[in-house]
Amino acid sequence: MYKAFLLKYAEIGLKGKNRGVFENALRDQVQFNLDKLGKYHVLREQGRIFVECPEEYDYEETVEALKKVFGVWGICPVVVIESTEWEQITAGVIDYVDKFYPEKNFTFKVEAKRANKQYPMTSPEICVEMGSCLLEHFEGLKVDVHEPQVRINVEVRNKTYVYSHIIPGPGGMPVGTGGKAMLLLSGGIDSPVAGYMIAKRGVTIEATYFHAPPYTSERAKQKVVDLAKIISAYTGPIKLHVVNFTDIQLYIYEKCPHEELTIIMRRYMMKIAEHFAEKHKCLGMITGESIGQVASQTMYSLAATNAVCKMPVYRPLIGFDKQEIVEISQKIKTFETSIEPYEDCCTIFVAKHPVTRPILSVIEKSEENLAEKIDELIKTAIDTVEVIEIG
Ligand code: ATP
Ligand code: MG
């Protein structure tokens, strides 16, 4: 039935002079997501994006793909009437209402647009004429111009487009319009959600994962690859840096007070991730931290971790409760993968009683114990990084 989709966007409309840049990015992202499914034409026209489906296509699959494009506020499946003749248009709209609304007892309003200003009727005339035509044809229908139950949109271009359903899109800004950031991606629940949230604001994502073989398994790494794959459906391709962290972790374990392990480890993770972030021209880093969730995420711990970074660190979940994060992870379908029971490199070396109020000067003092070998170990970790292209 539907031969096209009209995509509505919200915030892009506010962009003034840069609007064209945002619209092009949105068009490109839509085309990118749909190219995986088949042949579609994506056109940018007069403040909207049109998707034409010239061939047989899977409706559900297409809507799912469009629901993953940031910047899309609403997805309207459109029926195309291959004519601009009034008789054909009214016949087409009557047919549309007949097919899509089996119960004909609702209030409605016709909204009209015409791209071609030479068209013999004005938009208000189209609304009035089409409204009375529908009232005549279907007894149970009533007009309500203020709060109609159904808005029937009729757009006359070189053909005529009819739609009345709006499927909610994800909102946000098209990826690629907001610079690039490095996500510290673990196998947990939080970091994939954090990456999703920043990408939703138009930011391109790269990722770094620290593993500690043989303490963490190949399967734990695969879980992170799987998570990156799931979020890449929204964010576009992700370059995942897999860093072998074992020797650094063992060295910290050997040389530093055990209650400080997690904080010191987190500081080295940030430092190494920042190296890759700088190398790849990222403007910031992203973590899944949330105040007070665990000992390493108290305000004191966050301050101590943050002190090693020169770049801004974005923590989109900072004020979220775990349950709120879980809800987003369920919505974006990372939850089931995140709760697979594979070990995380942080959980293996954790102390029974980690510090919850680390003092930066004390932590820095402990790190002096690492002076002999740490630079060499960091260099090796960086030199042996494995880069996996995802999506
Ligand atoms: P998550 O659910 O994202 O794993 P978490 O609640 O387990 O988070 P922590 O283990 O304290 O929290 O990690 C805090 C943040 O540090 C994570 O959200 C993630 O951004 C980063 N991080 C933790 N472990 C790793 C890792 N092995 N590799 C990359 N980043 C990590
Ligand atoms: Mg974790």
Image: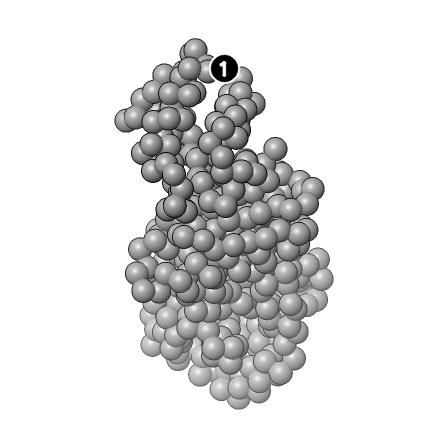
Q: In the depicted view, which residue is nearer to us: 271 or 117?
A: 117
Question: Which quarter of the image is occupied by the N terminus?
Answer: top right
Cβ of mark 1 under 8 A from ligand 1: no
Q: Which residue is mark 1?
A: 103
Q: In the depicted view, which residue is nearer to us: 387 or 299?
A: 387
- For label 1, the crowd category at 10 Å Cα-Cα, with few meaning under 14, some 14 to 19 and many 20 or more, is few
Where residue 306 appears, x then y in whole percent?
38, 70
Residue plotted at (49% across, 31% down): 89
Q: Is residue 312 left or right of residue 183?
A: left
Q: Secondary structure at mark 1?
A: loop
Specify the farthest residue to the top: 139
Where residue 370 appears, x then y in whole percent?
50, 82
Q: In the rendered image, is residue 353 in sight?
A: no
Residue plotted at (42% across, 12% down): 140
Residue plotted at (46% across, 73% down): 282
- On screen, 120 above or below 359? above
- On screen, 127 above or below 354? above
- On screen, 240 above or below 30? below
Specify the farthest residue to the left: 146
Where residue 26 appears, x then y in whole percent?
48, 57
- On screen, 195 above or below 4? below
Q: Amino acid at mark 1?
A: Glu
Q: Is residue 53 left or right of residue 352?
A: right
Question: Which quarter of the image is occupied by the C terminus?
Answer: bottom right
User: Image quadrant of residue 82?
Assistant: top right
Q: In the rendered image, is residue 361 in sight?
A: yes
User: Image quadrant of residue 366?
Assistant: bottom left
Q: In the depicted view, which residue is nearer to us: 240 or 374?
A: 240
